[in-house]
Amino acid sequence: MPAPQRGTALTILAILFGILAVSDIVKPFQFGGDQTGFVFFGKRLAGTPNMILGPLFGLYLLGYAAGIWAMRRWALPMAWIYVAYVIANLVLFTFRTPPPPGAGVGWQVFGIVYAIVAIGVSVGTARLLSRRQADLR
């Protein structure tokens, strides 16, 4: 039986999740300064927790991206777990992380746009995989 075709959307999403995985894997290096620590359940991490959880979560996303790329059945539960994490992380971030001093309406607009994109991409990927469930092997 030939391998199922991923299609353009899932191919792009697999690549984007792969890039996101690399981003999380390198979080401990804080290339962008102090504000580049991994955010875990609404709290930006630093030090040892950042060095452990950033790469671990990056490996999860790398596996997820590989599952999408290979059209594997196990990518589907990973997708819905990721959706739950994204939503929980965004909600908790608004309560656990105060805006930086002097942050105005731009901070709020960025947060809203970021939430729409993060939830949209994660839910959209999970729904697309769910619709293609019969093609997953």
Image (tube, rainbow, N blue to C red):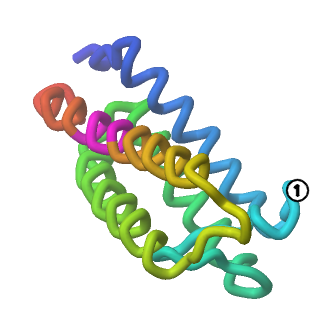
Q: Is residue 57 magenta?
A: no
Q: Is residue 41 above or below residue 84?
A: below
Q: Residue at x 72, y 64 (%)?
A: 102
Q: Is residue 56 visible?
A: yes
Give x and y (percent) for residue 53. 62, 75
Near mark 1 (Cα within 10 A), the count class, few <14, some 14-19 or many ≥20, is few
Type of secondary structure dominating the magenta stretch: helix
* Horizontal side of residue 47 vs 45, given as left or right: right
Which quadrant is home to the N terminus? Answer: top left
**Which residue position holds label 1?**
31
Q: Residue at x 52, y 40 (%)?
A: 17
Give x and y (percent) for residue 91. 36, 68
Q: Is residue 62 visible?
A: no
Q: Is residue 121 magenta?
A: yes
Give x and y (percent) for residue 47. 79, 85
In front of the other: 127 or 90: 90
Which quadrant is home to the C terminus? Answer: top left
**The quarter of the displayed image where residue 97 is located:** bottom right
**The quarter of the displayed image where residue 31 is located:** bottom right
Give x and y (percent) for residue 57. 55, 65
Q: Is residue 91 above or below residue 127?
A: below
Type of amino acid under label 1? Phe
| Residue interval drawn in magenta | 120-126
In front of the other: 105 or 12: 105
In front of the other: 12 or 87: 87
